[in-house]
């Protein structure tokens, strides 16, 4: 008797399970171009700083802009809820491990203050930096006009999972095509992990897609809900949607891999998987200039009924410039991310990011352990 097959499973891959194959021709790393373009803006670093309270405040956004990158300010975080956010951040950092979730729920129950949105955006703009801000879909209609009036340049609409179609019995939902016409500025939407969802979002006229559900170091969505797709597969599927949409319209949509990147190798594999840029959270939370002072917590941690995040200590505090450009003082790939990308592109013979999308990758679950016997011994001592 044959047994009916109700469901099949596809194999999906994360950063630790794949490797990049070097090219047949190599080029000098300093001859590789890693520029990232979104709308009319071009950035010399294809790395976005995540819209998380432990990572980005106005001062960090201004500093990172001087290095050539783009930071995203969370318009629903402590910066827009409190006149003196540094005091609240200090209390979060000092909170007892057993009480921090309850404390965060209390902190983020404070109403968002419209005047603080305008003040922070104007602070960033007056310093000559490009200003990107993040809102959740539920608050986009209310907060985005305030942010636009204050001078924002780029809007990021972000939640754990975002789709172009949402079924609800409540009010008329957020329609991205209408938002695009109203704001007339670049819009990034996230997060998604599938070809179909990405393609439908692209067809609404947006400019960028954030890829990743649950891979962040401070996120527990995968543990709490069991939802997510490993980042290599998710990025490749969304990049395939980008190719389909480009054939349909001639418009190129940016794919931004968001979360799960801990080392330079992870970052390089994200680009080889099809990313145009990446978004980093915990990596930048280690920066001496970050507001979290070595701590990091998930955006969904303060959820009033079902928290999907945790506060973590991210390790050694390092100057932002060293994290980005070195010189590195460690051998684990957690510093000089920009140098790692230039070097990988040189070894692969790819002069730009779009050529990096074409490099060959292989399934290689032992890539980090093969021949590393003595390193493994040292780790156990």
Image: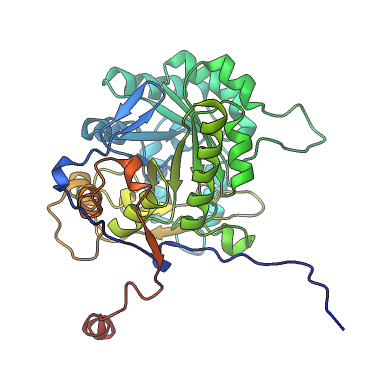
The x and y percentages for residue 119 are 40, 20
User: In this orientation, which residue lies closer to the viewer: 86 or 340?
Assistant: 340
Question: Is 255 placed above or below 2 here?
Answer: above
Residue 293 lies left or right of residue 207; in this view the side is left
Residue at 47%, 19% in the rendered image:
185
Residue 319 lies left or right of residue 45; in this view the side is left
The image quadrant of residue 12 is: bottom right
Question: Is 9 placed above or below 43 here?
Answer: below
User: In this orientation, which residue lies closer to the viewer: 107 or 344?
Assistant: 344
State how many labels appear.
0
Question: Is 37 placed above or below 47 here?
Answer: above
The x and y percentages for residue 27 are 16, 48
State the residue lying farthest toward the right: 1
User: In this orientation, which residue lies closer to the viewer: 118 or 272?
Assistant: 272
The x and y percentages for residue 173 are 72, 29
The image quadrant of residue 269 is: bottom left
Residue at 40%, 65% in the rendered image:
362
| The C terminus: image quadrant | bottom left
The image quadrant of residue 152 is: top left
Residue at 62%, 62% in the rendered image:
224
Image colouring: rainbow
User: In this orientation, which residue lies closer to the viewer: 362 or 219?
Assistant: 362
State the residue lying farthest toward the front: 24
| The N terminus: image quadrant | bottom right
Residue 307 lies left or right of residue 63; in this view the side is right
Residue at 42%, 47% in the rendered image:
274
Q: Is residue 308 visible?
A: yes
Residue 83 lies left or right of residue 143; in this view the side is left
Q: Is residue 381 visible?
A: no
The x and y percentages for residue 299 are 51, 47
């Amino acid at each position: 008797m044959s047994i009916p097959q109700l469901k099949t499973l596809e194999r999906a891959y994360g950063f630790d399970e794949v490797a990049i194959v070097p090219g047949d021709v190599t080029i000098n790393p300093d001859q590789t171009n890693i520029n990232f373009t979104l709308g009319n803006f071009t950035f010399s670093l294809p790395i976005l700083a995540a819209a998380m309270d432990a990572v980005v405040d106005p001062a960090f956004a201004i500093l990172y802009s001087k290095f050539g990158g783009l930071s995203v300010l969370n318009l629903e975080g402590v910066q827009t809820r409190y006149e003196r956010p540094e005091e609240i951040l200090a209390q979060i950092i000092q909170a007892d491990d057993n009480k921090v979730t309850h404390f965060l729920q209390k902190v983020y129950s404070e109403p968002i203050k419209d005047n603080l949105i305008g003040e922070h955006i104007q602070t960033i703009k007056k310093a000559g930096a490009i200003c990107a801000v993040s809102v959740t879909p539920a608050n986009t209609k209310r907060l985005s006009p305030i942010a636009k009036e204050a001078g924002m340049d780029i809007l990021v609409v972000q939640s754990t999972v975002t789709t172009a179609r949402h079924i609800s019995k409540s009010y008329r939902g957020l329609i991205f095509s209408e938002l695009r016409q109203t704001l007339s500025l670049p819009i990034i939407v996230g997060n998604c992990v599938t070809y179909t969802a990405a393609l439908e979002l692209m067809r609404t006229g947006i400019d960028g897609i954030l890829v990743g559900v649950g891979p962040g170091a401070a996120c527990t969505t995968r543990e709490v809900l069991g939802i997510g797709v490993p980042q290599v597969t998710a990025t490749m599927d969304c990049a395939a949607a980008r190719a389909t949409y480009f054939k349909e319209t001639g418009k190129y949509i940016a794919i931004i891999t968001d979360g799960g990147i801990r080392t330079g190798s992870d970052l390089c594999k994200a680009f080889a998987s099809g990313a145009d840029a990446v978004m980093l959270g915990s990596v930048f939370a280690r920066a001496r200039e970050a507001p979290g002072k070595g701590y990091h917590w998930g955006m969904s941690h303060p959820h009033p009924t079902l928290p999907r995040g945790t506060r973590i200590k991210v390790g050694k505090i390092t100057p932002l410039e060293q994290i980005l450009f070195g010189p590195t003082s460690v051998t684990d790939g957690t510093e000089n991310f920009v140098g790692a990308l230039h070097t990988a592109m040189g070894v692969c013979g790819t002069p730009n990011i779009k050529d990096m999308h074409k490099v060959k990758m292989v399934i290689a679950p032992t890539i980090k352990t093969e021949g590393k016997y003595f390193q493994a011994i040292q780790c156990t001592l």
